[in-house]
Image (spheres, rainbow, N blue to C red):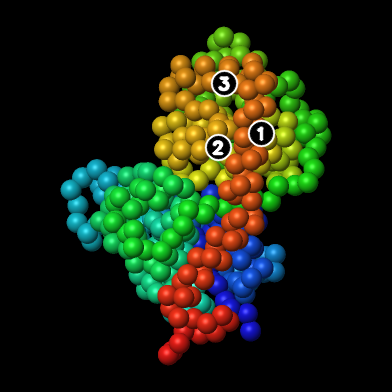
Amino acid sequence: MARKIGIVVQRYGLEISGGAEYHARLIAERLARYFAVEVFTTTAHDYVTWADHYANAVDVIHGIPVNRFRVKKPRDPERFGRIQKRVVAEEHTYLEELDWLDEEGPLAPALLQALDRRQDEFDYLLFFSYRYYHSYQGVRRFAPKAILVPTAEHDEVIYLRLFRDLFRLPAAIVYNSVEEMELIQRLSGNSHVAGDVVGVGSEIPASFDADGARRRFGIDGPFFIYIGRLDENKGIPELFRYYLALQQKDFPLTLVLAGSSRLPIPEHPRIRYLGFVSDEDKFSLLAGAEFLIIPSQYESLSMVALEAWAMGKPVVANGCTEVLRGQCRRSNAGLWYSSYAEFSEVVRLLHGDENLRQRLAENGRRFFTENYSWPVIDGKYLRLIERLDARRQIPEGGSPRGG
């Protein structure tokens, strides 16, 4: 009988095309090549309210059973905002941090109860995103077989007392970047916890239709592209300000935006908002772009940067974000900015120098292949599990000795 791995994540579905949830799906589908995998998640699709969306209690997605549990209490964004402001900016108690955790959600105690009933079936449980209810409570409850994929960003909540001990508890931690590992180890002193910097791979199509994507979306002339959610935490308002300032000098590159948006899009002939696009269109658009722009203020790993590098596209990133700056340095495949003056200089330089774009492209392909191709990612997960098996004295294909 195949050994079993559980994947526990806040949302899960083919319609969720980015972030920790997409990361979790890719890892689930890779680990399913080696283990029997099941997913435990919620019925939510919207990450702001956690409102019920998926009707089925059990789905099967790409051959993997997906167990969905209703959220006990949807999030009230206004109430959540007030509580978060208090715990990150004012004197507060530990109980108020627990209130924040319940409001952060998604509050799904039935999910944890199901894991309680079935925990003996699983060799390990992978919890994605440290800051959510399921990970905080699940890692504490199932620590000996918990593998945490924290997807931690350098934001305010990581400093809450709630999380001071959390990173010391799991059997192992899978980090997304060197910067994330250093941040967590500095805050928690958890260097004794097994772990590795792993990240995630990506499925890159064998062929693209860049010209077809241009025709479908009516894009004329050269362009650069942003791919992902359009919200404040992703640095989109600043991107709009910088790009519109650049347009006062008649900059010839069109800004193309692909992803769901919660923000108004400026009306400008060189700003093209496409909304959510399919993976096929995403990669075809990337293939036709001069470079990818990542203005995000908070990242634990930019998956779309890895996809761009795999396809031989340079990246321009927000240099105020340690992870993005570090990825660009290590790959030598991206440039970064920390002000409008630097933004203007970098995008003009990259647009005007095809040889530079080509050199960065070659560096990016090599960096992806050596660090983020699927054989590399698979190997890191399998070796980590082997280390945990040895620590728990689990023979290959068996149960812990003495239990």
Amino acid type at mark 3: Val
Quarter of the view holding residue 209: top right
Tag shown at residue 4: none
Residue at numbered disc 1: 362
Residue at numbered disc 2: 331
Q: Earlier in the sequence, mark 1 or mark 3?
A: 3
Q: Secondary structure at mark 3?
A: helix
Quarter of the view holding residue 226: top right
Q: Secondary structure at mark 1?
A: helix
Query: Which-is-in-front pick, marks 1 and 3?
Result: 1
Residue 321 in sight here: yes
- Camera-side residue: 315 or 219? 315
Residue at numbered disc 3: 347
Q: Position of residue 374 (x, y in %)?
A: 64, 55
In which quadrant is the N terminus drawn?
A: bottom right
Amino acid type at mark 1: Glu
Amino acid type at mark 2: Ser
Q: Residue furthest bottom?
A: 402
Is the residue marked by circle 2 packed among few (<14), some (14-19), or many (20+) residues within 10 Å? many
Determine whether, in the image, residue 120 is placed left or right of residue 218.
left
Q: CA distance from mark 1 to mark 3?
A: 19 Å
Q: Earlier in the sequence, mark 2 or mark 3?
A: 2
